[in-house]
Image (cartoon, rainbow, N blue to C red):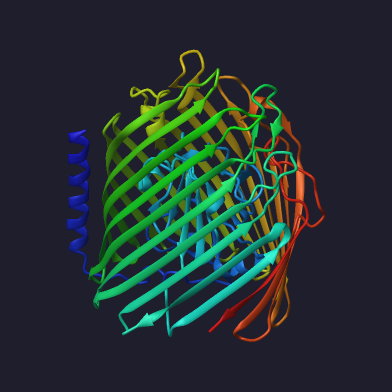
Amino acid sequence: MARKIQVFLIVMFFCMMGLSRADEPAQGGSAAQGEETVAVSGGEAQYDLGKVIVSATKTETYQAEIGSSTTVITADDIEKSGKRTVEEVLRNVPGLTVMQTGAIGGAVSVFMRGANSGQTLVMIDGVEVNDPMATDRSFDFANLVTDNIERIEIVRGPQSTLYGSDAMAGVINIITKKGTGRPKFEGSFEGGSHSTFNESLGFSGTAMEKLDYSFSVARLDSEGISTISGTEDDPYHNLSLSSKVGYKVFDNAELNLVVHYTDARKSIDDSDTSTYAPIDMPNYTSWSKDLASKVSFDQSINSWWTHNLSFSYHDMRRKDRKDWDPHNQTVIGDWYKGNNKKVEWQHTLSPVKWNTVTAGFEYEKESGSSLYSVTPDPYFSSSKQDRKSIDNCGYYFQDQLKIWDSLFITPGLRIDDHEIFGTETTYKVSAAYLIRQTGTRLKANWGTGFKAPSLFQLYSTYGSPDLSPEKNKSYDIGFEQSLFSDCLSFDLTYFHNKYSNLVDYNYSTSKYYNVGKAKTKGVELGATLKPLDNLTLSGNFTYTKTEDKETGRELQRRPERQFNFDVNWAFLPKANLNFGANYVGSRKDSGYITDKAYTVFRLAALYNVTENLQVFGRIENLFDKKYQEVYSYETLGRSFYAGLKAKF
């Protein structure tokens, strides 16, 4: 391990020494954060470089200059769709499968390109929010609302080179709004089916030319429906707070603080202990509290050298309680407490317009404990996990090369030193080539990833401290084509992932162990048509073939075919209409039961009465489709919602 670290530091030292002697100052640089699409002239045609994205390279880069497959969803996109939760927004992203156990508030898993949900890293303003005490360290999207979100960035393919463990399948980064200009106040109210009410209040702006701020609070309450087929409704309550503050310490330096907090409560159902038939549970409740915070210091050393020093803290607490009742006479009481602390120091050097080097160091420590108690239960005994901690040091290096403003090559290397399993090295190279004259972009991405075992897999009653990290090798290749001055564009990507050393549960020993192997491969196809300036039609299709190499069966809850369609029509200068459809093909569920395919339609509209007042409405499950995402868990029928938003 020491030798690899020495090699890494020596390479980094000589690169920085060489760069420091460069005479040419940085030009062209990165685009301003949040900037929209930009068309760059080239020969007889223009090429749209796309939106600015940060998550793919940890620097602000246009999508067209990145070899990885990326999607950027803006606040404007979210507003037009009328969607109120992040899980709803993610359903339209190619390569992603979203599955929810029940209606509003039910646990939500996101599978990226067929990978397990715990193999995708989720961040909020750069804070890693995967649950330290979840069995597979995955993130539950059930309680994440869209209020105060500026944009969502999705990067598909292995990202362990920059982000380490949990990013072996990709990254989802939620970025909140930054205060600008004069003070602004915004409030909204929405009500609808199942006694659902959503209220939010926020204010943002700048002060003293040095301070920017953005604060918001949102409340979501619903009587809901029965989680598992029954007659009793299972209510849901969610309180979310979000804040972002920045202060210019010097002309070239800024101090930033972000804090996000969610407090949610959901009534859930279970099954009869004797027949296992799903039944209503009037006294079974689940709570979760999630705190994510980060303080960072950004400074420009000179025109071509910037650095960022940050400390982030994430704390996740969950508990469940079920009292005795005649149908299910067990009493359940459990809690899970986990937190993650991370220090990162990143340097970005761009002395010439054709080269940007990113290098950094991370120290991360996660801790957690849990208790599960059920009485009486003939199959499972109570278990307790005392507080345990694991630390990890990561060193990463990336070089972004631009050749003739047409060829973009980005290699990267990372070394992780994990307390349990030792050294892990990951690497990646991506490339993109632009043919501006024809509106064509070619892209390719190849890399490796790893995922460390979770605290639960290592130290719980069923854990094993001898577990090794999961690993994968992945590549994808594709192209994008624009025609008729960007009135029509389409893209095609083929991806292939090979996973090994997967952690599985051995029922004979009641312990987790490394045995699993899996393969996922498929195609992502997308198209966008703009026949009029105010009319956009878009759609994407994903084909995913998965295989558990140990059993030869397909992976559970991952359909082979998915299709998403969206029409956005600004039929009046102040009005917008959005129509969408999601098709999810048949898939295997627990016990290899087949869940049927389904198609769900939705409609949303908004009208700006004045500059300061907007009215909006939406219909979910427009044609009242009866379906299930997860076997035995209910979903909403046709639902109506309407509200208004005021800005001052």
In the image shown, does 146 or 373 lie closer to the viewer?
373
In the image shown, does 197 or 260 lie closer to the viewer?
197
Residue 26: image quadrant is: bottom left
- Residue 143: percent from the left, percent from the top? 54, 53
Q: Quadrant of the N terminus?
A: top left
> Visible in this render: residue 62?
no
Residue at left 57%, top 44%? 107
Residue 394: image quadrant is: top left
Residue at left 38%, top 81%? 206
> Visible in this render: residue 641?
yes
Residue 609: image quadrant is: bottom right
- Please say if 497 is above or below 566: above
Residue at left 69%, top 72%? 616
- Please state the total of marks drawn on the protein image: 0
- Please say if 448 is above or below 467: below
- Residue 303: percent from the left, percent from the top? 25, 72
- Residue 290: percent from the left, percent from the top? 43, 51
- Please say if 64 is above or below 161: below
In the image shown, does 73 or 528 lie closer to the viewer?
73
Residue at left 42%, top 30%? 470
- Residue 213: percent from the left, percent from the top? 38, 74
Say left or right for 82 vs 581. left
Give the farthest residue toward the right.
623
Say left or right for 250 vs 135. left
- Please say if 328 is above or below 60: above
